[in-house]
Image: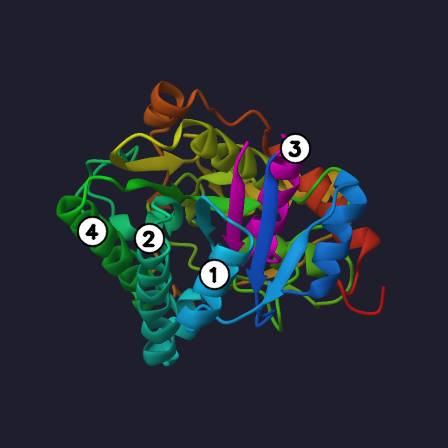
């Protein structure tokens, strides 16, 4: 069993991963400043797992705080989620994305090196593939980006590859996520975006619950089955289990890049119909022009995850929508005022 520092552990993916880590007997220390998350999530993690969770309030740019945390709690592994994640916001404020995501990761790596903690699982993204040259996307697909958020992830990946080349005592697993959706089956933790959601599923859910009037569908003239964008949606619990599998096999000298996706693409309108069925609510929508940086279709080749991690996605689109609706309906205002 490992003692794991989880940066950004109170966030959407981080909180679900902490649940799976704790349920498997690992010790967890969450390092989070709640800039895009809530301390209520940590209370809910404890509620679900019946296990204590240590939390350190800290900023990823504070190297000394990271060093003190690694030392105090004798962590031997880090899962790094902390960072800003809105594609649209990144185009408007790129410097904050490079500071938080890139500079913050460098501070983390410097702290880890100083404390001789060299086991890392990094939260990357399918955005590092840029405009797909072929589908499904395999890990050896050429890397490029279409926005500063994706660029920040790709820069970090390059830093990690350079770090490993300089010192092969590191064990690094880079996980490239596709589109995480859904929520824990308990309905107690889920995605709680600040302001208007940037991602499709929480936007659809907030329309269904009456928080937003209607969905805006960006682009209906793509070369896809119904003209709307196609993405690989993965249940957040499946994604969390992918991190658990990564932790279980980390420790050897390695620097791996692995997709976490289902290998199946769904269009925006297919998601709308699946969510209508799960919620029994109408979801009005309107079409708008394409957003800059969006691609027509994007889905994973998930074979490497199965071969290396023994992991594959198990939960389908119906379960994703049911669990997301359960969370949204039970927590209409997210973690606030509950």
Mark 3 vs mark 4, CA separation in Å: 41 Å
Measured from the top left, where is residue 269 in percent x and y? 55, 46
Q: Quadrant of the C terminus?
A: bottom right
Pick whichever of labels 3 and 1 is earlier in the sequence.
1
Label 2 secondary element: helix
* Label whose residue precedes the other's in the sequence (2 or 1): 1
In the rendering, at what x and y percent does residue 83 appear? 45, 64
Q: Where does label 4 land, which residue?
A: 163
* Label at residue 127: 2
The tag earlier along the polypeptide, 1 or 4, is: 1
- Residue furthest to the left in view is 166
Which residue corresponds to mark 3? Answer: 318
Q: Earlier in the sequence, mark 3 or mark 2?
A: 2
In terms of sequence position, does the residue under pointer 3 or pointer 4 come before the other? 4
Residue 218 is situated, as x and y percent measured from the top left of the image, at: 46, 61
Q: Secondary structure at mark 4?
A: helix
> Dot 4 surroundings within 10 Å: few (below 14), some, or many (20 or more)?
some
**Which residue is drawn at the image coordinates 50% and 72% (left, top)?**
59
User: Mark 3: which secondary structure?
Assistant: helix
* Observer-nearest of 296 and 164: 164
Find disc 1 in the rendering and name its residue: 82
Q: Earlier in the sequence, mark 4 or mark 2?
A: 2
Whether the magenta-drawn stretch holds residue 7 is answered as yes
In the rendering, which numbered label is found on residue 170?
none
């Amino acid at each position: 069993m490992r003692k794991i520092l989880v940066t950004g552990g109170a966030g959407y993916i981080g909180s679900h991963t902490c649940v799976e880590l704790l349920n498997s007997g690992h010790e967890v220390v969450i390092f989070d400043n709640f800039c895009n998350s809530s301390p209520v999530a940590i209370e809910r993690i404890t509620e679900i797992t019946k296990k204590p969770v240590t939390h350190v309030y800290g900023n990823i740019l504070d190297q000394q705080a990271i060093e003190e945390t690694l030392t105090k709690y004798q962590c031997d592994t880090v899962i790094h989620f902390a960072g800003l994640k809105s594609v649209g916001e990144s185009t408007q404020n790129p410097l904050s994305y490079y500071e938080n995501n890139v500079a913050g990761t460098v501070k983390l790596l410097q702290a880890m090196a100083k404390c001789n903690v060299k086991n890392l699982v990094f939260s990357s993204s399918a955005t590092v593939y840029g405009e797909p040259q072929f589908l499904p996307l395999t890990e050896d697909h050429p890397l490029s980006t279409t926005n500063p958020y994706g660029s920040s992830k790709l820069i970090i990946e390059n830093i990690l590859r350079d770090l490993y080349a300089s010192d092969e005592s590191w064990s690094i697993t880079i996980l490239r996520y596709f589109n995480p959706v859904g929520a824990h089956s308990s309905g107690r933790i889920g995605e709680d975006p600040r302001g208007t959601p940037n991602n499709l599923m929480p936007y659809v859910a907030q329309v269904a619950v009456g928080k937003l009037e209607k969905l805006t569908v960006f682009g209906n003239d793509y070369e896809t089955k119904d003209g709307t964008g196609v993405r690989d949606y993965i249940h957040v619990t499946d994604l969390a289990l992918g991190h658990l599998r990564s932790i279980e096999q980390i420790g050897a000298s390695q620097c791996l890049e692995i997709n976490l996706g289902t290998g199946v693409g769904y269009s925006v309108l297919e998601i709308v119909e699946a969510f209508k069925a799960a919620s029994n609510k109408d979801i009005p929508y309107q079409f708008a022009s394409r957003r800059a940086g969006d691609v027509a279709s994007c889905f994973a080749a998930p074979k490497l995850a199965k071969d290396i991690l023994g992991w594959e996605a198990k939960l389908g689109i119906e379960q994703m929508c049911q669990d997301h609706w359960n969370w949204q309906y039970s927590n209409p205002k997210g973690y606030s005022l509950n």
